[in-house]
């Protein structure tokens, strides 16, 4: 073998040279895609912002983003020489298999569309679903994110929202808070009802209209049952609840109104053959009598 024989090494830059132009074009397409997605979402959503809810605006932005992302992906694949007809054929075959596996996702998307038109809640509302209650943090095509009052995020599929019973706590600007109160039987009913109404009227967080509801609701085992229903602004709930419960307790103590608690009378029967048993039956209790 000749001593001056050298083996040429492959140049990595030469290997990447055929892909230089597609890479540059793909980067340009990607940058333009993000820019167009932002511009189109602003042009479409901003003029309609006064007529669309936050939920609708969010879903429209995401639909524009997903659509442009699909177009960008197709254009990038074409830059690298992929044939769309081949890809579409493969996608059709794969779509059948994926369709069976994605039935749940499709159901969530359809449920999300129903929620979009029905509008049972918006971003920022407080809703209750089953045992979970919290603020609606975000609404997506597949699910909803609920942030509870102790700052825990819960992802709830849209299908669950459509099928289950959903309670919108803050849908209306005012709410009524009902307080069930048990008062002992030796208290005067008219006096108790007058005190309940006075406490409600003096609370600054209780609305004058609609007026508070004061009612005697029944006779319990050891109490007279009263209902005090007060209307308040939805944002004042915590302050109103804490203040009116504190005021009721202070007023009851001041006027000597006793809050009922269960009473039990225990009767102990005498044992058979005991002196107490014999005395109860009129029998002699000493020997020889």
Image: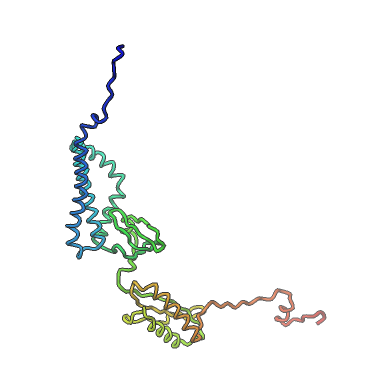
Q: Nearer the viewer, residue 2 or 178?
A: 2
Number of numbered discs: 0
Seen in the picture, residue 236 relative to 135 is either above or below; the reply is below
> In the current view of this chain or complex, which residue is farthest to the top?
1
Q: Nearer the viewer, residue 274 or 149?
A: 149
Q: Residue at x 20, y 37 (%)?
A: 22
Seen in the picture, residue 243 relative to 87 is either above or below; the reply is below
Q: Position of residue 180 (x, y in %)?
A: 44, 76
Q: Position of residue 145 (x, y in %)?
A: 34, 57
Q: Nearer the viewer, residue 117 or 7?
A: 7
Seen in the picture, residue 186 relative to 85 is either above or below; the reply is below
Occupied quadrant, residue 74? top left
Seen in the picture, residue 152 relative to 20 is either above or below; the reply is below
Is residue 233 toward the left or the right of residue 219 in the image? left
> In the current view of this chain or complex, which residue is farthest to the right?
288
Q: In which quadrant of the rendered image does the N terminus lie? A: top left
Q: How is the image coloured?
A: rainbow
Occupied quadrant, residue 263? bottom right
Q: Residue at x 41, y 79 (%)?
A: 227
Q: Residue at x 40, y 59 (%)?
A: 152
Q: Residue at x 48, y 83 (%)?
A: 252
Q: In which quadrant of the rendered image does the C terminus lie? A: bottom right
Q: Nearer the viewer, residue 87 or 68?
A: 68
Occupied quadrant, residue 57? bottom left
Q: Position of residue 25 (x, y in %)?
A: 19, 40
Q: Position of residue 17 (x, y in %)?
A: 21, 32
């Amino acid at each position: 073998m000749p001593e001056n024989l050298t083996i040429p090494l492959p140049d990595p830059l030469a290997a990447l040279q055929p892909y230089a132009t597609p890479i540059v074009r793909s980067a340009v397409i990607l940058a333009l895609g993000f820019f167009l997605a932002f511009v189109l979402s602003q042009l479409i959503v901003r003029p309609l912002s006064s007529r669309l809810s936050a939920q609708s605006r969010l879903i429209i932005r995401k639909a524009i983003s997903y659509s442009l992302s699909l177009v960008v992906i197709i254009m990038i694949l074409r830059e690298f020489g992929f044939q769309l007809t081949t890809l579409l054929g493969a996608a059709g075959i794969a779509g059948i298999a994926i369709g069976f596996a994605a039935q749940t996702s499709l159901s969530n998307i359809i449920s999300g569309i129903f929620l979009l038109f029905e509008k049972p809640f918006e971003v920022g509302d407080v809703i209750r679903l089953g045992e979970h209650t919290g603020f609606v943090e975000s609404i997506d095509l597949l699910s909803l994110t609920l942030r509870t009052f102790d700052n825990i995020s819960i992802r709830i599929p849209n299908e669950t929202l459509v099928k289950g019973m959903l309670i919108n706590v803050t849908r209306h600007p005012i709410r009524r808070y009902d307080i069930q109160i048990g008062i002992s039987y030796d208290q005067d009913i008219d006096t108790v009802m007058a005190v309940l109404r006075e406490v409600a009227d003096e609370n600054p967080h209780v609305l004058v209209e609609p007026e508070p509801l004061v009612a005697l609701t029944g006779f319990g085992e050891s109490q007279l049952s009263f209902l005090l229903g007060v209307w308040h602004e939805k944002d004042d709930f915590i302050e109103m609840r804490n203040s009116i419960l504190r005021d009721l307790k202070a007023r009851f103590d001041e006027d000597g109104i006793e809050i009922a608690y269960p009473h039990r009378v225990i009767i102990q029967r005498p044992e058979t053959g005991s002196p107490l048993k014999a005395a109860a039956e009129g029998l002699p209790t000493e020997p020889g009598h």
